[in-house]
Amino acid sequence: MSDTAPVWVDSHCHLRPESAEEQIESARSVGVEGLVVVGTDVDDSRRALQVAGRHKRVWATAGVHPHEAERGLDGLERLLDEEDPVAVGECGLDYHYDHSPRHIQRKAFSTQIALAHERKLALVVHSRAAWKDTFALLQSEGVPKFTIFHCFTGGPAEAEHALSMGGYLSFSGIVTFSNALNVREAAAICPLDRILLETDSPFLSPVPLRGRPNTPANLPLVGEEVARVHRTDSETLAEATSTNAARVFGVCLDS
């Protein structure tokens, strides 16, 4: 084991502009050197890109979350063309809350898969209570080369399906929850070169911080649990997941 402190990348977080500076500084103080700020609609994506533009080793995505699908995708293509996002998303299907009608969610997801293909960008997928339709739409539209199943909540069967399609699995603080045995089992079978880590802040604070707003500075707690279930050390996992994030998003951690 190396004496060098692990260097982590938070592959999926949500930062408000007014608190971004403080959160980024706090994350860097514990070894989280890279952050991907994720957009959930066109306006939110624009804010994420503005935050990324002000900080080194902070990048942003542009997409429309299934909750916001009913509001449409107007302006998304222009944002993808005029700015420099590292991925399309987050997008996908959420049949747990159904904030947008399912047929509209599916249409928005299909369109964003196509946009990822057209622009040769990674795709950040949100799937909750919708694995069958998520996999079916990806299969029919074609899986982008770098497809990330964000905040992975499936078990080994869903993990194997996602991996067989060429996907990457991104694990959040859920992996630390006592009732998330299936997620830990999925993490255990995921090859090291296909794992990403995320906080999904300000949501899903890991144990022992549940009930508090999450921040990217909590990512090492997620990484330590994934390392434990993967039977490896934190340094090895940090190096692998940081390398994976750089590959998937096409970014450089040394800049």
Image: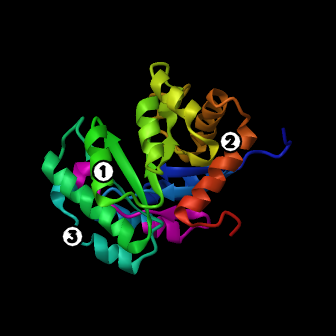
Residue drawn at point x = 38 percent, y = 50 percent: 125
Residue with the mark numbered 3: 74
Give x and y (percent) for residue 198: 52, 45
Residue with the mark numbered 1: 92
Q: Residue furthest bottom?
A: 82
Q: Residue furthest top?
A: 178
Left or right: residue 244 versus residue 14 is: right
Identify whether 101 is placed above or below 63: above
Which class describes the residues within 10 Å of circle 2: few (<14), some (14-19), or many (20+)?
many
- As rendered, which of 116 and 85 lies closer to the eye? 116
Which class describes the residues within 10 Å of circle 1: few (<14), some (14-19), or many (20+)?
many
Q: Check disc 1 and report its element: helix, strand or loop.
A: strand
Q: Are marks 3 and 1 in contact (CB under 8 Å)?
A: no
- Precedes in sequence: disc 3 or disc 2: 3
Res 217 → quadrant: top right
Give x and y (percent) for residue 245: 58, 55
Q: Magenta residues, as a range?
A: 49-68
